[in-house]
Image (cartoon, grey):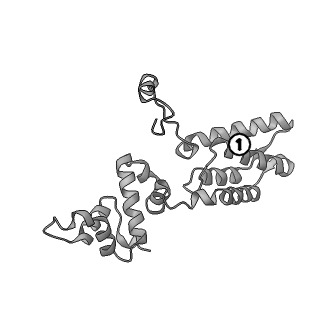
Amino acid sequence: VSSGKFREDLLARINLWTFALPGLRERAEDIEPNLDYELEQHAARAGRKVSMNRDARAAFLRFATSSAAAWTANFRDLAAAVERMATLAPGGRINEALVREEIGRLERSWAPAAARDDDDDAVLARHLPREQVEGLDRFDKVQLADVLRVCERARSLSDAGRALFAASRDRRKVKNDADRLRKYLAKFELEWRQIAP
């Protein structure tokens, strides 16, 4: 519509439903059942059963549900990881060493995406436990992530406060930007020393 390739009035007629499909990263509860499914699929294709020992399974699930797992290609990443481990499994048994190798491979393949500084989830994950992030409203996530980005780059609490409150600073009687920022961070149980570069 904005580029003029589609008429706005036609879009208004067909724009009845919108859907949000969360990625695998936001659906940690789907990882374990799909791990089992992919192992079964490999067994059907290869004609041999492959399993994971308890420690290997726990290590993979711990990583797969952590903030370090980007899952940029969603279920395709998971399916490929299971396929590689199952194919390389000595005697049809995936062990911890194989899981560690696969985790390293996934981390390397995701490095450019995971290293993006502008990803709100990555910024929040650096400073807050996953449970706390999951309990935040979208409004708070976006705002807090931006504040944390500024704080990570600032030389001091005062420097960060001046950058964040520059527009309203002259209209306030008390110009203590550092205190204002400190109180904002405290709402999320954060302190400057936890964030400071």
Locate residue 52, reporting x and y percent. 74, 47
* 194 relative position to 53: left or right: left
Looking at this view, is 12 or 22 the one in front? 12
Locate residue 150, reporting x and y percent. 39, 66
Q: What residue does disc 1 label? A: 79
Quarter of the rendering occupied by the C terminus: bottom left
* 182 relative position to 80: left or right: left
Looking at this view, is 10 or 172 the one in front? 10
What residue appears at the point 61 percent right and 49 percent down from the top-left corner?
72
The residue most toward the front is: 4
Q: Secondary structure at mark 1?
A: helix
Above or below, 41 against 142 in this view is above
Q: Residues within 10 Å of mark 1 (few under 14, many from 20)?
A: some
Looking at this view, is 143 or 30 the one in front? 143
Above or below, 155 against 184 in this view is below
Above or below, 131 against 9 in this view is below
Locate residue 82, reporting x and y percent. 73, 46
Locate residue 185, reporting x and y percent. 32, 63
* 160 relative position to 31: left or right: left
The residue most toward the left is: 173
Task: Tally the numbered discs.
Answer: 1
The residue most toward the bottom is: 155
What residue appears at the point 71 percent right and 53 percent down from the top-left corner?
56
* 62 relative position to 130: left or right: right
What residue appears at the point 35 percent right and 48 percent down from the top-left corner?
139
Above or below, 52 against 19 in this view is below
Task: Give the quadrant of residue 164.
Answer: bottom left
The residue most toward the top is: 13
The residue under label 1 is which amino acid type?
Ala
